């Protein structure tokens, strides 16, 4: 049986590669279910995810697994024909048309390999009877470590110093750093990621305070929480965001909230781009109110991040200026991108989908509608 599964995987990859060379695109893989087994089809599988798809498939020989490197769209929904469920990950919206096209193929069980569900047309999903899962916890450490490393880099002005050294300027001044232990670090959102970030900052010796409308009892007992965001803004030298993108949180960092912050504050956003009014942050950087900005997510990142712009006209002048600033560290939504996290995202998404197509309650269901 193992040979059948491996052959299927190899056939899919071979077809994608060969047809891509012929047409310059990534066409639909062979998708005929000849075994009679239940089937899961996965979209936008990257090369770094393939080993974990194979790992899961090799341990679930009663499930036929197919996949493509293409995103789920109304056009590619047909690839899932004959499948019982799909596993997906993408920055594009799951529009009404996309969901309808998938439902037309008889598939309404969808498992995301990521956390965010704000790009799903939930009204349409509810209308069509979709069951949806996500992977809310795949590696808090991956994102928290990235945020912490970038925070320390901003404080020590490593971007400026690296450029100086590369150009042969080995003078110290005026590139003087700030020690993490001298900072009060304000953490907005004390879920899994926020708590790990707090631990890392305390490991550096920083004073940590936090705000969350849903307070963690243990953290409350230890006295981390302040009573309001305004209080956090007023006290913090560093402010790190670890909250979801909701209507209530849209542009929570804006002209008015920045005005309430300490002078020379460092802002860290490794959560969601929509949390930050980018123009307001730029104004704060220009005035010197903001000392530095860590940006792993960007409100207009769709279609820009995870693409190669070398030798091409860069599509976003505002983002380009941010990238070029000496006190801004931009990464293209890669805080999550570790081997540990990617493996967990793939395995947990397939586990959820397998549970759904077998009539079982998935580990991490998403409320639809």
Image (cartoon, rainbow, N blue to C red):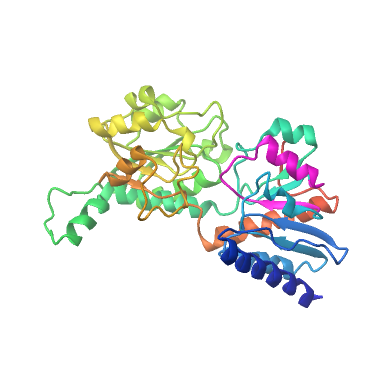
Residue 93 within the magenta-colored segment of the rendering: yes
Which residue is the extreme one toward the top?
Answer: 256
Question: Residue 62 lies in magenta, yes or no?
Answer: no
- 130 above or below 39? above
Q: State whether residue 224 appears in this view.
A: no
Compared across the picture, whether 187 is left or right of 1 comes to: left
Q: Is residue 229 left or right of residue 92?
A: left
Where residue 132 sits in the image (x, y, percent)?
A: 73, 43
For the C terminus, the image quarter is top right
Side of 66 where 139 appears, left or right: left
At 77% from the left edge and 40% from the top edge, which residue is drawn? 130
* Image location of residue 305, percent across then percent down: 46, 48
Q: Residue at x 75, y 53 (%)?
A: 80
| The residue positioned farthest toward the bottom in the image shown | 3
Residue drawn where x is 46% and y is 25% of the image: 228
The foreground one among 244 and 51 is 51
Q: Does the rendering let one see residue 316?
A: yes
Task: State which region is magenta.
Answer: 84-107
317 or 363: nearer the eye? 317
């Amino acid at each position: 049986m193992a040979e059948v599964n491996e052959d299927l995987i190899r056939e899919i990859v071979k077809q994608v590669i060969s047809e891509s060379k012929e047409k310059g695109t990534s066409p639909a893989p062979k998708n005929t279910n000849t075994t009679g087994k239940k089937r899961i089809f996965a979209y936008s599988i990257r090369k770094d995810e393939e080993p974990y798809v194979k790992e899961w498939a090799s341990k679930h020989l009663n499930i036929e697994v197919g996949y493509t490197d293409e995103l789920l769209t109304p056009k590619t929904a047909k690839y899932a024909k004959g499948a019982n469920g799909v596993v997906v990950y993408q920055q594009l919206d799951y529009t009404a048309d996309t969901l309808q096209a998938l439902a037309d193929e008889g598939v309404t069980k969808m498992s995301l390999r990521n956390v965010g569900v704000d790009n799903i047309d939930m009204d349409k999903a509810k209308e069509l009877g979709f069951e949806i899962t996500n992977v809310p916890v795949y590696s808090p450490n991956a994102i928290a470590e990235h945020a912490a490393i970038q925070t320390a880099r901003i404080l020590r002005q490593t971007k400026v110093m690296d450029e100086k050294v590369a150009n042969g300027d080995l003078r110290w001044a005026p590139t003087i750093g700030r020690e993490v232990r001298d900072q009060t670090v304000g953490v907005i959102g004390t879920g899994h990621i926020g708590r790990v970030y707090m631990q890392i900052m305390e490991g550096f010796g920083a004073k940590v305070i936090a705000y969350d409308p849903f307070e963690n009892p243990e953290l409350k007992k230890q006295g981390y929480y302040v009573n309001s965001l305004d209080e956090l803004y007023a006290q913090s030298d560093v402010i790190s965001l670890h909250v979801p993108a909701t209507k209530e949180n849209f542009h929570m960092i804006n002209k008015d909230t920045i005005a309430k912050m300490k002078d020379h504050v460092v802002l860290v956003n490794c959560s969601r781009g929509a949390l930050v009014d980018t123009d307001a942050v730029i104004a704060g950087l220009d005035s010197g109110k903001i000392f530095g900005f860590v940006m792993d997510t960007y409100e207009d990142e769709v279609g820009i991040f995870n693409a190669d712009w070398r030798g091409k006209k860069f599509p976003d002048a505002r983002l380009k200026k941010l990238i070029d600033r000496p006190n801004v560290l931009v990464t293209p939504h890669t805080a999550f991108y570790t081997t540990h996290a990617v493996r967990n995202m793939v395995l947990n998404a397939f586990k959820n989908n397998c549970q759904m197509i077998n009539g079982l309650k998935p580990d991490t269901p998403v409320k639809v509608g």
